[in-house]
Structure formats: structure tokens, C-alpha cells
Amino acid sequence: MVRIARNRRGRAGERRTIRSSSACRRRRGSVALALLVASLVACHGRTSPTSGEVRLTIGYAAPAGLSELASLLTSDILIHTGADGRVEPMLAKSWSVSDDGTSVTVELREDVSFHDGSLFTAADAKATLDDLRELPGRLARNPILEDIEAIVIEGPHRIRIDLTRPSAQLLLLALGVRVEKPGLGGERVGVGPFYIETQGIEETTLRAHEDYYLGRSDIDKVVIKTYASVRMAWAAMMRSEIDLLFDVPIEAREFVEADTSVHLFSRDTPYAYALIFNTRRPPFDDDRVRVALSHAVDRQAIIDGALRGWGSIASGLWPSHWVYGGKELTYDYDPEGVDRQLSDLGLFARSPNDPDNASFPSRLRFTAIVGEDQAQLEPIALQVQRQLRHVGVDMELDAKPQAEMDQQVEGTDWDAALLSLNTARSLGRLFMYWHSSGEFAVSGFAGADEALDSLRSAVTEADAIKAASAFQKILFDKAPAIFLANAETTRAVGRRFVVVDEPGRDVIETLWRWGVADDRSAGATEPN
């Protein structure tokens, strides 16, 4: 039942959004929601930009993660990972790898200044990497940094990174780290297009960095307003209180899209929804059970229903990465085959009249933990539950706060967990979940460590392709999780801004290049 699907994106980074006619019907939502949006849209009009200072206001509904958004706008990274997984220059303008793959020499830009006016040098790059290596938990999340033996300053803008093993290919991907340094008051000082002027729980203000090395932004001031929920932030945009909605909720996309005063910008994220099994616990220690259950789920139905058509079928890996050659391994929906496979394993469907199974005719029962504060996971969990029942499998849902769920999954007392899983646009992330040494090594399976260790030691691109393809096949054959759907995110931007929209890149990353539209160009986007 193996299906090898070619990458349907065309060129790297293009969005693969599946929106079937049935999904469009499902996305109509409730009458009450429609009436609410209609009334908000009808009564609001975007305010025209005032003379003088250009201000952009962002509505953000994750106060606990505000620092992450602020960091995106105030700091830059050494090396950028593109949509196809290839590394691109940023603060590092070039690099070279030794023939044996045990040393990387990095040339840094010479025209970069921090927000405090000091110049960015090799010493700052070394200090950034040294700090990361000492940060608790960082090595578990990015174990490739553990291979660094020494960082040597070879000049004002050159460092050499010596490695304990030939892992230069993955190290370059691990250099997507943000450069900051401590300021005089203990605050973090970056080199990005904006700097923090004021910071608070409800509102944070950023100002344009006058000496930004890529050019000063035309946006003078960015205000980030935090809201208790995405719905509240969305309502604020409908009332013209914000110019950019950081995350448009799935249930609102159709209605926001109908608002002619805003643009929507969607892109795939490096995350996929997946039901991960505890492979150390029966019956999920048998990969034949896991493979059978992977054929029991109609992923397209989940995309059409729970995600309202916004998403794509997941394979568990970043689908556009160059190491996979545009191939994806996914499971066909085959409930009849599942019945045969489970019966062959001794898991027979029971009659409803069976006195030992009167409540539900299940051949297999297990509990899946779901984060109760992750709103999008609930409808996905309910759909998976219904589909598994069709093949005689009873999945009980146990909703818990995300922190409590994470703690339980770190132990052994659990059957399965529904997670948002990193699909590794940067290959080093594979070690987080699938290598036994990873921070989130919730699911070990035969052959994973060997394949990933080969990837880690790849010296050439050919070596990396061979090792990554081997791991891709093992991940499919062993099915440590039911990979469901790739997640997608959508930003909404008022049309008074000219947005730079580059394939595969979050528009937040190009915000410093945006401009203000006049009446003739309102709503235009700048091509790549």
C-alpha cells in the first residue's frame, strides 16, 4: 500500500493548499459567526495613513510567546534556511567546509551594527554560539551544536568552527541562530531592522533601526498589541484597531478573505499534526499494528473537516527539502485492509453482543492525550476517533494542559499523544523526536538512530541524500506515528501596506521592506 507522491508544489516554497468543494461547504461556519463578521466588516473602514510617522500595529494572541515575535523583528540570524532546506547567507556572507567535514570557516559581514551602535564582529558570533551551547536544554533540541569542539577567531570578521566528527552539513543548518548580546541594563540588544523602545504585557513598541545594514525600514514604528485569544485579535482587526493580524483562525479565514480592505498571506509551516505512539508499550511496540492504523485514517477528510480545507497530507517530513528529491511517502486510506491486517495479528473485531465488550465492539482500546489549550487539536482528535471506530478501534481522549501533557509524555505511562510535530526544514530537528538522544525522544524505533547518525556524519550532499532517503523509508515502514496534516498559517494585512511576499517565506520576515500604498497601488504586493 505504499504510495510515493511527487511533490505537488512545483517550485520550492510554493503553497500546497488543498481546498475541495466539500471543504468549502464545511467552512461556511455558523450563522451567528457569519452575522458577527458581516456587521463588523460593514461598519469599519481602514484609516488612511497620517502624514509624518508611518506606524504599523500588529495584533498578537500569544502573550507568553511575545518575545519570539519581537525577536523576529529585532534580531537577525547567522545563516538562513530557505524553503527548500538549503542554507542562505545572512549575517554570515560566505562559508567553506574542510574536505573531511570536520571544520567550517565562516566569513561575516563587516557592515552590521547593533542597536547600541557597536559593530558586529567575530567575537560576537563566537559569544552567541558559546551561549547557546551552555543554555540548558538547547543541546537536546539541537544536538548538532554538541559536535562543536572549538570556535576559533581568525580575524575581525572570520571564525573557524572545529568539530569532533564530520558533521559540517548539519552544522550549517544549525547556524540559523539569532545574534543578540546583553545591553548595559541587562536587556538583549540585536542587529535587526527594529529595536525595542518600550515593552509591556499588553503592548510593545519597536522603532526602526537607523543604521540597519540592509537599509532603514520605511515603517518608523511597530506596535505589538497582545490579546487573550485569536478571536479577540481578529475582532480588533475588523474594528480597524490593528493593521496586521498575526494568525488568522481557520474558522475566520473565509470571512476575513471576503473583507476587501485586507490581504491574506498563507504559507506552510514546518509543523504537522500527528498521533504519536508510545512504541515501548504494547501493542504499539509492534510496528505492524502501527502501520495498520496508519491506513485507517482518511487524512483528506480531516483536512476538509477539522481544518476546513486549509492544509495538505503529511508524511512527517518537510516535503520540499532538497534531500528527499521531491518525493513523499504517505499511506493510502484502506479500512478493509486494516481489518485484515489487525485480524492477522490476533486483534479481531468483536460483536456488540460480546459480554466482555458490551460498551463498544472494539478490537483494540487505547488512550490518546490531547492538549486542552491547543484549540485546533480537538476537532482533529474527534475526527481521528470516529475514523478509528470504523475499524473497531476505540481511542479514548484525555485532554490535559499542554505542560502536563508534555510531562507525561516524557515518562512511560501513556499510549499515544496528539501533537504538533516539527517536520524538520532544518534537518537537525529530526534528532529532537526520532533519535534516542533527542529532547522529545518520545518514540524510539528500530533503525532510526543508525540512519540519523549517518545523516549527521554526511560530508557531501550525495551522502546527505542517501542517509536522509534511508531515514525517510524507515520512518514510513516503522510508522511511529499517524502523520495527519501539514499545518498552515495565515497573516492578514491591511491594504494600505505594500507587502513583500516571497515564496516560502513568512511575510513577517520581510516586514521591514514594506511600504505604504497610495490610492493607485493600495493592496499591491511586491514580487520576489
Image: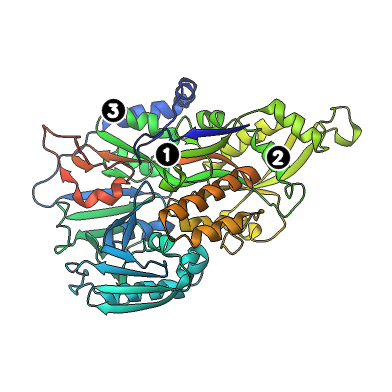
**In which quadrant will I find the N terminus?**
top right
Q: Residue at point 46% right, 29% down?
A: 309
- On the image, the x and y values in percent for residue 24 come to 44, 23
Q: Dot 2: few (<14), some (14–19), or many (≥20) neighbours within 10 Å?
A: many
Name the residue tied to disc 3: 42
Q: Which mark is residue 249?
A: 1
- On the image, the x and y values in percent for residue 351 come to 85, 27
Q: Residue furthest left?
A: 51
Q: Nearer the viewer, residue 387 or 81?
A: 81
Q: Secondary structure at mark 1?
A: loop
Q: Residue at point 9% right, 51% down?
A: 52
Q: CA distance from mark 3 to mark 1?
A: 20 Å
Q: Residue at point 14% right, 57% down?
A: 215
Q: Which mark is residue 395?
A: 2
Q: Residue at point 17% right, 72% down?
A: 117
Q: CA distance from mark 3 to mark 2?
A: 44 Å
**In which quadrant will I find the C terminus?**
top left
356 shown above or below 150:
above
User: Mark 2 vs mark 1: which is more N-terminal?
Assistant: 1
Q: Is residue 26 left or right of residue 193?
A: right
User: Mark 3 vs mark 2: which is more N-terminal?
Assistant: 3
Quarter of the image for residue 151 reads: bottom left
- On the image, the x and y values in percent for residue 406 come to 60, 57
Q: Amino acid at mark 3?
A: Ala
Q: Secondary structure at mark 2?
A: strand
Q: Nearer the viewer, residue 238 or 392?
A: 392
- On the image, the x and y values in percent for residue 148 come to 44, 73
Q: Is residue 226 left or right of residue 344?
A: left
Q: Residue furthest right?
A: 355
